[in-house]
Image (spheres, helix red, strand yellow):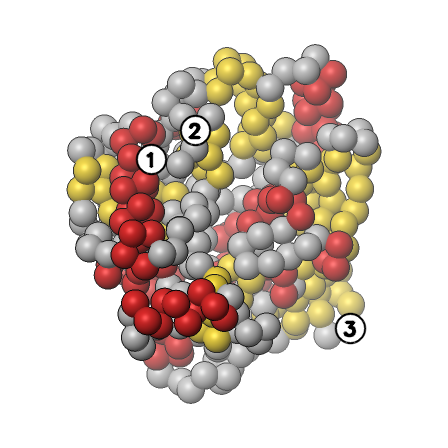
Amino acid sequence: MNLASCTTLGLGGPARDYAEARTAEELVGLVADADRRREPLLVLGGGSNLVVSDAGFDGLVVRVATGGVSVERDGDQVILTVEAGEDWDPLVARAVAEGWSGLECMSGIPGQVGSTPIQNVGAYGQEVAQVLRCVRVYDRVTGQVADFEARRCGFAYRDSLFKRDLGRYVVLSVTYALDISEMSGKIVYKELATRLGVPLGERVPARDAREAVLALRRGKGMVLDPADPDSRSAGSFFTNPVLDAESAAALELRAPGYPRWDLPDGTVKVPAAWLIEQAGYTKGYTRGSVRISTKHTLALTNPDGRGTTEDLLALAREVRDGVREKFGITLVNEPTLVGCSL
């Protein structure tokens, strides 16, 4: 199995062994057997947040193909328990259609449900941590299945306990608590509010929020589309850096009036896309067969499928180093790197 066919970037070499798990029991069994044999293991979901080396993976790749959604009502909420292999955006679409609020601003994000707690997936002012109730995992250290309530997951911006100890926990299912409402959550992201024509803090029909988010994402090449070469990416390649007060003050000296979000804990989030552009890396900037998206500077793309992982990483290093030289800030990759590094 060539792993390029399993990733949205279309990059990556072969897997030595490959298997699909269609139930949680099969998934646990395959993982446990590999661990008993001390065989290198890669658990693969939708491949939308993954960069695999050109050499591929010298071990067993287990693709999560589990499915199923259970729904229970709890007062004015619905509790959804979703198998890890379910695709994310169809779940969001169903929630909006059913009148369940809390996922609509995360429309259009590629990948599977199992990845959402690992990355604490989020967009346009919503994130999974706000609606997640429980994650069921297989713990490869203890050999046991365990349930992690949200407070135990260590959620932070695009981060979690599962990401910080990457590889230990295999997500089996995720439980979300959504409000029963035709209205969206509060619109707190300025770009989305502008698109909807409402003030910050307003609620709108969840269907309207979803359509606005999808339109914004399509405009940035962030909705998978075979006809759009800019969507051949891993989404945002770098996270928005979060600066402490000292670092924020230092950046102010280098770039007075820079765009920023002041966070409640006194830190400052800075848009990585702005840093990249100001460092001279514009939309469409090309290196060999890979390039920065023509629609969004945060996405690195393999537009015609002829690139290599090393090409992509060379471009990522160039951008990272250019931003560091100009602003003293080191950008951090958001996708998981397999068999390679920046």
Q: Say if mark 1 contacts mark 3, CB within 8 Å.
A: no
Mark 1 to mark 3 CA distance (whole Å): 49 Å
Where residue 53 sits in the image (x, y, percent)? 40, 26
Verify CB contact (< 8 Å) between mark 3 and mark 2.
Answer: no
Residue 16 vertical placement versus 48 (above, below):
above
Mark nearer the N terminus (1 vs 3):
3
The image quadrant that residue 80 belongs to is bottom right
User: Residue 212 appears in which quarter of the rendering?
Assistant: bottom left
Confirm or deny contact between disc 2 and disc 1 (CB under 8 A).
yes
Question: Which residue occupies the foreground of this view, 161 or 203?
Answer: 161
Would you say residue 229 is visible in this rendering?
no
> Closer to the camera: disc 3 or disc 2?
2
Name which residue lies at 43% across and 20% down. 56
* Side of 142 where 83 appears, left or right: left
Asked whether residue 140 appears in the rendered view, the answer is yes
Residue at the disc numbered 2: 340
Is 199 positioned to the left or the right of 296 in the image?
A: right
Q: Residues under labels 3 and 2: Cα distance? A: 48 Å
N-terminal of the pair, mark 2 or mark 1, is 1
Question: Mark 3 = which residue?
Answer: 75
Crowd around label 2: few <14 · some 14–19 · many ≥20 (10 Å):
some
Position of residue 3 relative to residue 111, above or below, is above
Task: Give residue 220's quadrant in the image.
Answer: bottom left
Q: In what element is the residue under mark 1?
A: helix
Q: Residue at x 36, y 56 (%)?
A: 328
Residue type, mark 2 in image: Cys
The residue at the point 27 percent across, 56 percent down is 326
Q: Residue 321: x, y in percent?
A: 31, 46
Task: Report the residue marked by disc 1.
Answer: 313
